[in-house]
Image (tube, helix red, strand yellow):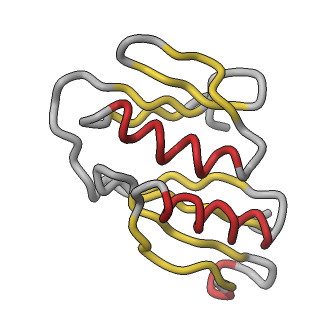
């Protein structure tokens, strides 16, 4: 249903280090890079980070990205922590969302919430 998601960040380079680390563990890469924006995907730009010179505002909700399995969720979570993110829910089962749902939550450098999930559908 989603075509793409864009998040406004306060420091493009800092946020790119975080998303590079997380998305590389999920088989995603930078597919566009400009002065004020970077986009990630497998082939098409689907997840954008954009610097517009405004302060990022956490607490809007979260974005969930799919992972190939539990090991990928664990690896992406660890990579995000190593790249300056903060833990907002360690990897583990989330039975309240379904019997196969396994997820981890991170806060990016601006405090925006990212969920990495396997078995969601």
Q: Quadrant of residue 10?
A: top left
**Residue 26 vertical placement versus 36 (above, below):** below
Identify the image quadrant of the C terminus: bottom right
**Residue 90 vertical placement versus 56 (above, below):** below
Please give left or right for residue 13 compared with residue 76 in the image.
left
Please give left or right for residue 38 compared with residue 108 in the image.
right
**Residue 41 vertical placement versus 116 (above, below):** above
Foreground: 49 or 18?
Answer: 18
Q: How many marks?
A: 0
Residue that sits furthest to the front in the current view = 82
Q: Position of residue 89 (x, y in %)?
A: 48, 78
Q: Position of residue 41 (x, y in %)?
A: 69, 31
Q: Quadrant of residue 55?
A: top left
Foreground: 3 or 73?
Answer: 73
Q: Position of residue 72 (x, y in %)?
A: 76, 63
Q: Position of residue 82 (x, y in %)?
A: 50, 62
């Amino acid at each position: 249903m989603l075509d793409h998601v864009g998040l406004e960040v306060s420091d493009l380079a800092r946020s790119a280090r975080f998303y590079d680390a997380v998305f590389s563990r999920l088989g995603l890469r930078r597919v566009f890079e400009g002065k004020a924006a970077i986009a990630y995907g497998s082939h098409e730009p689907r997840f954008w980070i954009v610097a517009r010179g405004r302060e990022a505002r956490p607490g809007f909700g979260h974005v969930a990205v799919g992972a190939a399995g539990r090991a990928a969720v664990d690896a992406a979570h660890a990579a995000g922590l190593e790249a300056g993110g903060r833990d907002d829910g360690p990897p583990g089962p989330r039975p309240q969302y379904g019997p196969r749902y396994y997820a981890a939550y991170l806060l990016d450098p601006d405090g925006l919430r990212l969920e990495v999930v396997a078995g969601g559908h």
